[in-house]
Structures are given as C-alpha cells and as structure tokens.
Amino acid sequence: MTASTMTAYDADGLDALQLGHLRHFANLANQPPNQWELMNGKGYGQEDFGGYRFQLAYMAYALALTHRHRLPAAPGVFKPVFEKLMEKMLLPEVWMYWRDVSRGGSVFNAHLAGNYREEWNPVVRDNIMYSAYVQSMALMYNYLFKDDRYAQPGALTFKHWSFFWGGGEKRFEYDQKSLNDHIYWQMVESGYLGVACEPNCVFQICNQPAILGFRMHDLVYGGTMADEVTHSYEQAWEDFGRVGENGHYHIMMSQDTKAVRENIGKSPWVDAWAGALLNMWNRDFVHEHYPRQIRDLVKPGKDGALSINTNPRPLVMGQQIVNDDCDFGWVAAWVSEMGDAETLRGLLTHADRHMAPRWRDGGLYYPRNDMFEDAAGNRTLMEPMSGNVLLGYARLNIPDGLWHFYNAPWDAAHFEAPALLRVAPDVDVSKAVFDPATNRLEFSLQQIEGGTPDGAVLLGNIWSRGPWELRCDGQVIARDSGDALSVTGSVEVRADDDGVVMRCPDTKPHAFSMTFAGP
C-alpha cells in the first residue's frame, strides 16, 4: 500500500480490544524508569524469551505494524510511546544479563568457556538477541517518523555505574548508523550464517530482526544492504537447510562445529517465532511450510477454541528448566502474519475464555499465570511476553503485515499528507487515514476516562492544501477560507503554526473529517 491507496483495514478502524492493547503498551512504556510492573516472568536474570528486551521490542514492532496498516495518519499516537520504549530498552536492567551470559558455560558452549570473558558492552560481540532489536527499533523509528534523533552521536549509549561497586562508569556509545554497521560486519565475518546470541549459538530467529534493521537502514539512507544480506544468508544456509526432516525449523547452529540443532520436539515457539519474522523477506518459503507445521502444533478445543501442543520441560545438566517459552503467544503472532483468520480466531477465543483477560487503566492484557492448565484440562499458562505483547500484536497485525511493512514502504507523499501529528495521552484514536482521492482526512477520537483531562490533537501538514472544512459526526464545526478561520461548533478549534489544534469533546466516540479544497 502506498500513501495514495487505502485498505479495508484502514477503513474499518480499530475495535475496543485493539485499542485496549495499544493503551496497555502505552501504560507499560510510561512506567517510571526501572519499574517493570506486570513484566516479570518465571525466568531469572533476563536471560530467557520473556525478558524485558523482547517485550519492549515487540511492543515497538506492534506499534509500527498498527501505524503502517491501520492508523497511517496518526503518527502522534505512536511516536511518544516508541520513544519511551527505546528509553527503557537502553536501561542496564534490560542488558546487564550479558555480563554473565557472555562468559559461557551452557551446554552449548561450556567446552569453549575458557576462551570467553565477562563482557560489559552488550553489543560488541555476539548478543544479537539484544543488539538487533536496538538497531531495528532505532532505524524503524527514523523511517516511520522522519526523525533522526537516534542517528546523533551517542544517541544509543549503554551505560552503568553503581555507587556500591564496580569503580568508574561503564559507557559504550553508538548511534543507529554505527550500530547497524557493526552488526553488518559481524554478519559478513560470519560468512552470512548469522551472529551468535549466546556464545557459539547462532539462532535463525535472532538474526531476522537484524535483517529488518538493514531494510530500515536502506529506506532511511538508500542502498541495498538488506538484499545483499538476505541473498548471501540464503546461500550460506543452503548446505544446512532451514527445516528438518519433520518439516520444522532448525533451532540453531553451533559456530565451532557447524552442527545444526533440529527442532525434534516440535517446540511451537521455534516455528512460530521464526515463521513470523522470516515471512518479511522469504514469504513463499514460509507459506509453503506453514500448513504442515501448524497442523502439528495446534489442538482443537470446545466451541471453536484452539490451543497448542507443548512438550514437558526437559532436564538439562540435572536441572529442570524454568523459563518462559511464550509458545501460545508466538503461535498467535505467527498465524496473524500467515493470514490464517480461522486459527487466530480459535486461539483468541481460547485466550478470552481461559486466560483471564483483564482491563487496567484502559489497557487490555492477559495476566501472568504459572499454572499450566485448569481442572478441566484447558491451557491457562500465560507469560508476560504473551499476555502483555504477543496476543495484542496478533490482534493488531494484518495478513502478511510484516511482509508488507518490509516490501511496500510508504512513498514521499505519505509524509507530506495531513495527519494527527500530536495526540494527547488521554485520547484513543480508532481511525486515522488520509485519502488523496477525496482529499479528506478521516479520524475517530474518544477521550478516555480518568487521569488529567487534556484531549488536544494537532492536525498538521494542512496549510499548503488550501481551504478546508472540519466536521464532527457529520456537522461542520470549523472552516478555513484561506483568509480566516471560523469555528461554528462547540468543539474547541484554533489555528497554530504547525496546524490546527482541536480538543476531543468528551469520552464518547466521535467521527471527524477534514476535507480540503486544494491539492
């Protein structure tokens, strides 16, 4: 979709559940620094798949997909939340796990641990499961909002100092371009097989966000870095294959032996996470394998509900693994990308029926529940990554949403079109699209209850388009003749250097349209 076309997703607008997920993302993002309420899972030390970094990154991805596909004319809804997510992404609590993980000692690298050392810099080697998310989020922000704040020297700085231990400040300065270049050369030096997560472990999944970042880099700066990397990545993996004999994605490769670890147990998170991301640049391959994979992973419930098959936690080195795999959430996100509406509906039906959806401060989420199933055998296990992020991601995504985001970028006209450039935190926007065919900006607003009332919305990119007329629920409330602004309704409307500021009237939903007489 280009800026000159509309989709059915634009026209439909967001429903109450989708708005609830967006509000929950904003609520989590706006918590004070180092407050992680509702975000702590079973795992310790931020090492596993439910870590803060994954929750923050996929909230940002969900915002990007929603802005791109559903609310393209509302950058003011997404930009401030995105900035808060990035602020949190750079906090030591998010990346300090690397100080310990970098030393090795797991079953996959214990034999090499003598070669490793404690590494404080969270992006300098390996650790693509963090560095690629910072890289892709920064460049995605630049692309979406035409704001290069993360391109400034030191804009992506990782720092830690304690009054109690450790001596002087640890400080590692990057920006979006230097971090992108660093990851690119790590990819090249690997022979395009990919950068390791933990030492010696190259996961297919964790290298996909870096590829998304390369694509965003190309959209911001020009060039074909993403094409080069994906072409070379395909060639590098050709000898190993992407899937095993059972049709499921390989999990990882060991750097030292080039041995591939297959998904013998058919773990849902492996196929779902890999498939949801790989689809952005390898759609035919992903769709080809999807039917067989999903057939093995999903199990039917009652009255249209669907759940998933999950294996028991294995013993490793004599220890029972305690972590968040987020199987249910990742399968939901994957089927949304595949456009499998029936399966997505079944999974969400199960979640709404058995996983205790909850509303808090206008936001919708599924609270953590460590119990695997209820007395009737219905899956109830819910991790913060799934309940805070992935089920919302699935509801907000569209079929092939990441593929369209990657392959059909906005044209220059989109960024010059009328839009909601600023939106007060207490306003929900369920629709925001500009249609150049009718020269009309259509948007729907509702002020949320509670909190400090504001309701202000800035309509920008309008002064070069000639006279306009603003309507609320079909009634004219303001006109600009080109010489003067006249306000004829009860809604507050005033001119501003950056556009027109108006206030959402109340907590009821209202439909607005601004029609232009000019180009």
Image (cartoon, helix red, strand yellow):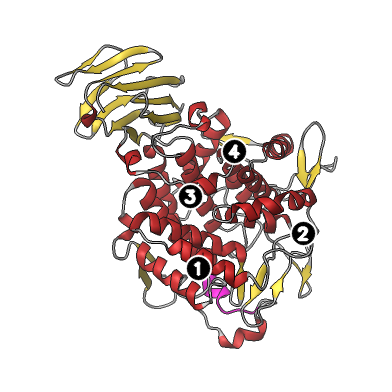
Where does the magenta region start and end?
93-105
Q: Is residue 452 left or right of residue 274?
A: left
**Label 4 to label 1, Cα distance in Å?**
32 Å
* Residue drawn at (57%, 72%) of the image: 193
Q: Which mark is residue 96?
A: 1
Q: Which mark is residue 395?
A: 4
Residue occupied by mark 3: 407
Q: Is residue 482 visible?
A: yes
**Label 1 to label 3, Cα distance in Å?**
35 Å
For this orientation, the residue located farthest to the right is: 376
Label 1 or label 2, whichever comes before in sequence order = 1
The majority secondary structure of the magenta stretch comes to: helix
Label 2 or label 3, whichever comes before in sequence order = 2
Which amino acid, by three-letter code, is at mark 4? Arg
In the image, residue 407 lies at what x, y percent?
A: 48, 50
**Marks 1 and 3: which is nearer the front?**
3
